[in-house]
Image (cartoon, rainbow, N blue to C red):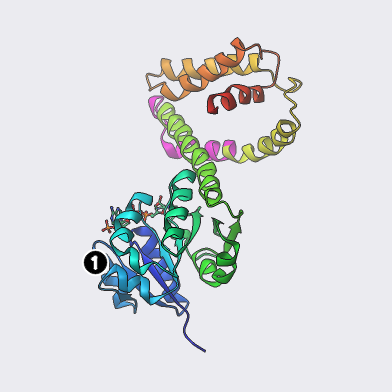
Amino acid sequence: TTQQSVTIIGLGPMGQAMTTAFLDRGYAVTLWNRTPSRADALVARGATLAPSVEEALAANEAVILSLTDYAAMYDVLGPAETALSGRVLVNLSSDTPEKARAAARWTAERGAVHLTGGITVPPSGVGQPESLTFYSGPREAFDKHRDVLEVVTGRSDYRGEDPGLAALFYQLGMVMFWTSMLSYWQAIALAKANGLAAADILQHATDTANSLPGFFAFYAERIDAGNHVGDVDRLAMGMASIDHVLHTNADSGVDTALPAAVAGLFRRGMEAGHAADSFSSLLDIMQKAEA
Ligand code: NDP
């Protein structure tokens, strides 16, 4: 049997963790990074640092990209584009769905395949069986390189042929992650302004976060059925509640940008006539903003 092999371009924390995961599983790993010294510890563990991008591409059909964004991909691969033909680029850099679609076209024009990836875990989750990555693009490439993908994360969720879909699923997670984490920072700021430490509210914050999936499931069904009936919650109640939140934060002297933004959305829902509807009716406003 021949040794399995892969090329990895980009050695930030994620690319380094991926390289380690492949080395742990006995893969031959070829590396390239703009700053070559970031490969030193990995080369000491058995990886090969390619002297050029062309040689990194030539080493393997499966080429993982782990760069800051898609612009970095053009910086790295643009000068080496003649070496792209026949490669399968597994792009685990994050960016927008539109950037992913453009990259798929750019790659196809150069005779290569672009598989968009959206990895949902930090470096510590790379290589773990329960970790998840979204993929989209040519199904054939996904199936052919399944072994490689399942080293990156144990779970691979193929979303479809549209190269934008994996990026979209990644962004669905990120819009929740950043806003949720900021809601946690807001709670910590409020706690600290009142003499409490982050540790003092950790259990309460955890219990609050753990209560959310029940709400997700309850509202998902109603939202998909177009049901915003105010039988268990009314927007007018929510408006009063978020005003209390806003004033508690203001009275405590902490920044109110985040609760004020939320209160602003509630107010627009009230003005649109949704006072007696569920606060899920705010989706009317949020979906229109998108058009
Ligand atoms: P970094 O931003 O630390 O990775 C930087 C890599 O991109 C380095 O190899 C860097 O090279 C290279 N790079 C950046 N710009 C250029 C450029 N213009 N030309 C050439 N090379 C460039 O990111 P991470 O490793 O943390 O993450 C990689 C991707 O994974 C990102 O898209 C990130 O959003 C995503 N991600 C990250 C997670 C995390 O927790 N870190 C979690 C999930 C996804 P050099 O070493 O020379 O600077």
Q: Which residue is mark 1?
A: 36
Q: Secondary structure at mark 1?
A: helix
Closer to us: 8 or 243: 8
Quadrant of the rendered image holding ligand 1: bottom left
Report the residue at 50% width, 56% height from top.
117
Residue 181's spot in the image, x, y percent? 46, 38
From what the image shows, is residue 50 above or below residue 209?
below
Residue 280's spot in the image, x, y percent? 66, 25
Structural crowding at the residue carrying mark 1, measured as other residues with C-alpha within 10 Å and reported as few (<14), some (14–19) or many (≥20) = some
Instruction: Assign the magenta stretch its main secondary structure.
Output: helix
Q: Is residue 137 left or right of residue 213?
A: left
**Residue 199 shows in the view:** yes
Quadrant, the C terminus: top right
Closer to us: 290 or 285: 290
Disc count in the image? 1
Report the residue at 35% width, 52% height from top.
68
Find residue 21 and report its image quarter: bottom left
Closer to us: 207 or 25: 25
Find residue 44 and report its image quarter: bottom left
Q: Is 179 a magenta residue?
A: no
Find residue 182 and report its image quarter: top left
**Residue lying at the far bottom of the rendered structure:** 1
Q: Is mark 1 within 8 Å of ligand 1?
A: no
From what the image shows, is residue 142 above or below residue 168?
below
Report the residue at 48% width, 80% height from top.
4
Residue 49's spot in the image, x, y percent? 29, 74
Task: Name the kind of residue labelled 1 in the image.
Answer: Pro
**Residue 91 shows in the view:** no
Q: Is 204 a magenta residue?
A: yes
Residue 138's spot in the image, x, y percent? 57, 60
Report the residue at 61% width, 54% height from top.
160
Q: Which residues are magenta?
A: 192-208
